[in-house]
Amino acid sequence: MGAIDIIIKDLKVLISDRKALGILILMPIILTTILSYALKGAFTNTPKSRVEIAIVKNYDRQEQINKLGNESINGDEIVKQLDVEKIFIDEFLGSEEIQKIIQYRVVDEKEGMNLLKNREISSVVILKEDFIYDMTINLLTTSTNKVKIDIVADPDKYISRQIVEQIINGFCDTMSSIIIGKNVLEKVMTEEGIQYQYIGNVIEEINKSILDTKVDINYTNTKGKDPITSSDYYSVAMATMFILFAAGYGSKMLLEEKDNITYQRMMISGISKWKVVVGKFIALFLIALGQISILIIYSTITLKVNWGNLYLVTIISLCSVFSIAGLGTMIAAITYRVGNYKMANAFESVIIQIMALLGGSFFPIDILPSFIQRFSILSLNGLALKSYLSVISGYGMKDIATNIITLIVIGIIFTCIAVYVLVIEGRGSYDEYTKVKTT
């Protein structure tokens, strides 16, 4: 009997175990489907920490004042009295209420894009070339120029970008209401009088002003990146969480074989403990790989999830299940050496839940307190989840390389611990037993 026989035996045992198949395959499929549709609102919740944004002023203030002067408007005097830049940046974004949600900094466009690329901020709000001119003309005259604002967002920060969009929209709606009220008032003042029966005309003019007076927000993502949908997120979240249960399933294998006298028979037959470790590791590797492959195929076909670059998805999957196989083998070895199932049970009932929470499998870690977010690097599912989401968003190998290397290193460390516990420290445990039986 060799390592291949051990692998085949473990796979046959899993296939015959309907309860295990339900937990490893059916349960994540059900939860992925439900969460993809039912928890879309979770992507609009306010995070515990403030959203970091950058403000870019793509205009020359003096040129805007001069341009107003060309319209027979005293630009210097008007901008002193009606400073729309100050209204937006200082009075609106700088207000006490908004400061509780958003923290901003004013930078040039190049610096803003670098901050976004380095993920130090969630969005860059760009005030376009004629921001002061168009806004002032709308407030002072009956003209209705479109005020253009660009929002460039990090697609990974799906909650933060929603918040920024809603707040900027709130400002725009407020300014539009002021402009509409002013336009209606001016029209009424130019009339000789308003009869009650003509109030419908006033309402019509208000509706017309609302249609004509718009702030044009061009909301885009970082160049070449796609936003994450709820189906994308929860397909990845459930897949990366439930491969932890594969490790939990494997964690009881050795002790169960000991209780069933199977392990002793393997020792008597002359199979080395090295082969046992290799067999258990490869069996867990194949179980987790098959599990995550089924979930990827299901979400692709049923939920229309685009996982991105197949080559990178394959690398992430192999590295993830490698670390999971190492974790499961290590816990199996420790459980066997301890001689009871407390370690394995604690892993399934407590540790997996903690890792799932820290890794973002339950909900995006953006909504967790910042001090908890720092611990996300401790969860294998969190590393895999971030890597998958990055690939779905359009990022390349260099953006996930750190996570990939970390998963490989963790897998190696766990496997080495399993070898030490089962092979090196346990050397000689069955030597006497084997000699007596063979004699």
Image (cartoon, rainbow, N blue to C red):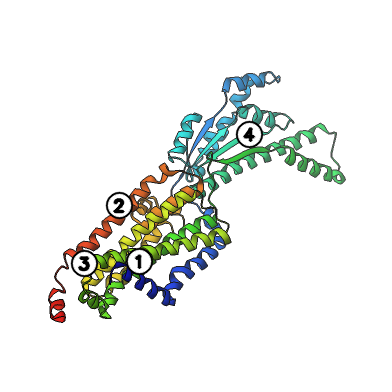
Q: Are marks 4 and 3 in contact (CB under 8 Å)?
A: no
Q: Which mark is residue 307?
A: none
Q: Hey, which quadrant is residue 413 in on the image?
A: bottom left
Task: Name the amino acid, label 1.
Answer: Ala
The residue carrying mark 2 is 409
Measuring from the top left, give residue 400's x and y in whole percent. 41, 46
Measuring from the top left, give residue 160's x and y in whole percent. 50, 47
The residue carrying mark 1 is 283
Residue in the image at 48% along x and 33% along y:
112
Residue in the image at 54% along x and 36% along y:
125
Front residue (pair 409, 370): 409
The residue carrying mark 3 is 422
Q: Secondary structure at mark 1?
A: helix
For discs 4 and 2, the disc positioned in front in the rendered view = 2
Residue 362 is at least partly visible in this image: no
Residue in the image at 27% along x and 78% along y:
262
The residue carrying mark 4 is 148
Q: Are marks 3 and 2 in contact (CB under 8 Å)?
A: no
Specify which label sits upstream in the sequence, 3 or 2.
2
Front residue (pair 73, 163): 163
Q: Are marks 1 and 3 in contact (CB under 8 Å)?
A: no
